[in-house]
Image: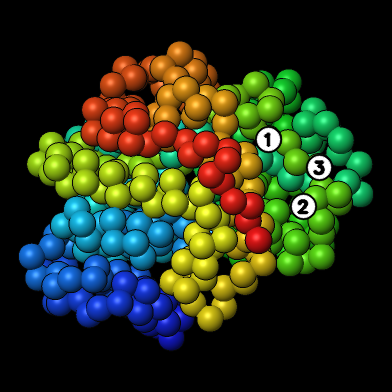
């Protein structure tokens, strides 16, 4: 849990970042919320709450850039960002109406919708074109192949999305899913358990695990990283999620949010250093800039920029790929395969030309 002092620092940073004062709204953010006020009077703007699925981090730069550059304000939106506690928690809270918009795992959403059809959530954009799901071991463990995970101790928080998909990953790599022992810990202790040898491997987002291990003195040369996307599961990464009933009631709001977000993503890809600075300004005093730089660089290299994005545009998907992965996950969870239009609704996306991947010549390196 973020302390009140840390949360207030986070809120103050974004208030300064947007260079004006917010007016009171009908929605009062919690002490952990990050409120962003546009550079004009906000009394006529719609207050919305956004959950990024975890702490504000480097790969959230598109959000903070869209705030900083006034894109949400131009759409009539007064955005509040509040930290999350993992995809499963975010999906549950979006479905409950605690957040208007969330960033979460498509495949955890499928499981949630199957169990909660009256509170179904749907993806309206998929900015993370590849999944960051991974199993990470230390090379010193001698585990050099995913098949060698059989019989080992794996660690992760209870709600960890890659952990939830472990049975599907295990089937793909030829490991009996129930042959491993899962050790549950608080998210902040996951990498500590690995370094201390309390577990043989951990599951998690590579954007979370690798920067945390770097803080513990471990470089990528010390690690074996088994990406789900390189082991039979061409999964998409986090999507922008909304409750179906909210989407039906607020179509223009969702369209405006997406227009602003993708402008922020394009700005981040053009100038990732500026994107990093916007996150650091919005973050609290405990934020480690070097860790966030690593996180953002991984996101740029592996999640945002891919050959498929050149074709479908930022936030779009390849229908055949999505259909295949949805079927894989549904089978792994022993669920009926949902129709694609119940998983992803692309009709609220900006035109492809407005969410094109910036040309390589326009992309500055992250420094």
**Dot 2: what SS?**
loop
Disc 3 residue crowd, few under 14, some 14–19, many 20+, Cα 10 Å: many
> Upstream in the sequence, badge 3 or badge 2?
2
Q: Which residue is located at x 81 percent, y 56 percent? A: 219
Disc assigned to residue 227: 1
Whether residue 309 is visible to the viewer of this picture, yes or no, is: yes
Mark 2 and mark 1: Cα distance apart in space: 18 Å
Mark 3 and mark 2: Cα distance apart in space: 14 Å
Which of the image's four quarters has the C terminus?
bottom right
Q: Which residue is located at x 74 percent, y 45 percent? A: 136
**Dot 3: what SS?**
strand
Horizontal relation, residue 146 to residue 288: left or right: right
Q: Which residue is located at x 70 percent, y 54 percent? A: 210
Horizontal relation, residue 134 to residue 272: left or right: right
- Quarter occupied by residue 35: bottom left
Q: Which residue is located at x 70 percent, y 41 percent? A: 135
- Quarter occupied by residue 255: top left
Residue 264 location, x and y as percent?
39, 52
Proximity of marks 3 and 1: CB atoms separated by less than 8 Å = no
Q: Is residue 293 above or below residue 140?
A: below
Name the one closer to the observer, 263 or 239: 263
Mark nearer the viewer, 3 or 2: 3
**Dot 1: what SS?**
strand
Residue 53 location, x and y as percent?
43, 53
The residue that label 2 is drawn on is 199
């Amino acid at each position: 849990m973020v302390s009140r002092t840390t949360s207030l620092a986070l809120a103050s940073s974004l208030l300064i970042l947007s260079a004006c004062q917010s007016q009171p709204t009908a929605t009062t953010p919690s002490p952990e919320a990050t409120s962003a006020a546009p550079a004009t009077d906000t009394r006529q703007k719609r207050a919305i709450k956004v959950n990024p699925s975890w702490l504000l981090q480097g790969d959230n730069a598109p959000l903070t850039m869209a705030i900083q550059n006034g894109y949400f304000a131009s759409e009539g939106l007064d955005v509040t960002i509040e930290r999350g506690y993992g995809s499963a928690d975010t999906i549950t809270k979006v479905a409950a109406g605690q957040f208007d918009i969330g960033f979460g795992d498509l495949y955890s959403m499928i499981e949630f919708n199957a169990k909660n059809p009256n509170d179904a959530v749907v993806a309206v954009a998929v900015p993370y074109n590849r999944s960051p799901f991974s199993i990470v071991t230390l090379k010193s463990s001698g585990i050099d192949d995913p098949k060698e995970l059989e019989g080992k101790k794996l660690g992760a928080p209870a709600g960890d999305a890659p952990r939830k998909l472990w049975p599907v990953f295990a089937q793909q790599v030829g490991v009996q899913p129930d042959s491993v022992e899962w050790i549950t810990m608080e998210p902040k202790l996951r990498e500590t358990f690995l370094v201390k040898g309390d577990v043989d491997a951990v599951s998690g987002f590579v954007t979370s695990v690798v920067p945390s291990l770097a803080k513990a003195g471990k470089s990528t040369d010390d690690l074996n990283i088994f990406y789900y996307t390189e082991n039979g599961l061409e999964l998409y990464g986090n999507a922008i999620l909304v409750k179906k009933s909210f989407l039906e009631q607020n179509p223009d709001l969702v369209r405006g949010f997406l227009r602003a977000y993708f402008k922020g993503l394009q700005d981040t890809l053009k100038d990732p250093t500026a994107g990093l600075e916007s996150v650091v300004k919005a973050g609290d005093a405990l934020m480690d800039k070097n860790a966030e730089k690593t996180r953002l660089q991984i996101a740029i290299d592996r999640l945002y920029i891919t050959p498929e994005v050149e074709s479908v545009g930022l936030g779009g998907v390849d229908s055949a790929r999505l259909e295949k992965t949805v079927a894989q996950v549904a089978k792994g969870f022993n669920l009926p395969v949902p129709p694609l239009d119940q998983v992803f609704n692309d009709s609220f996306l900006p035109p492809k030309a407005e969410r094109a991947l910036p040309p390589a010549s326009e992309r500055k390196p992250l420094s």
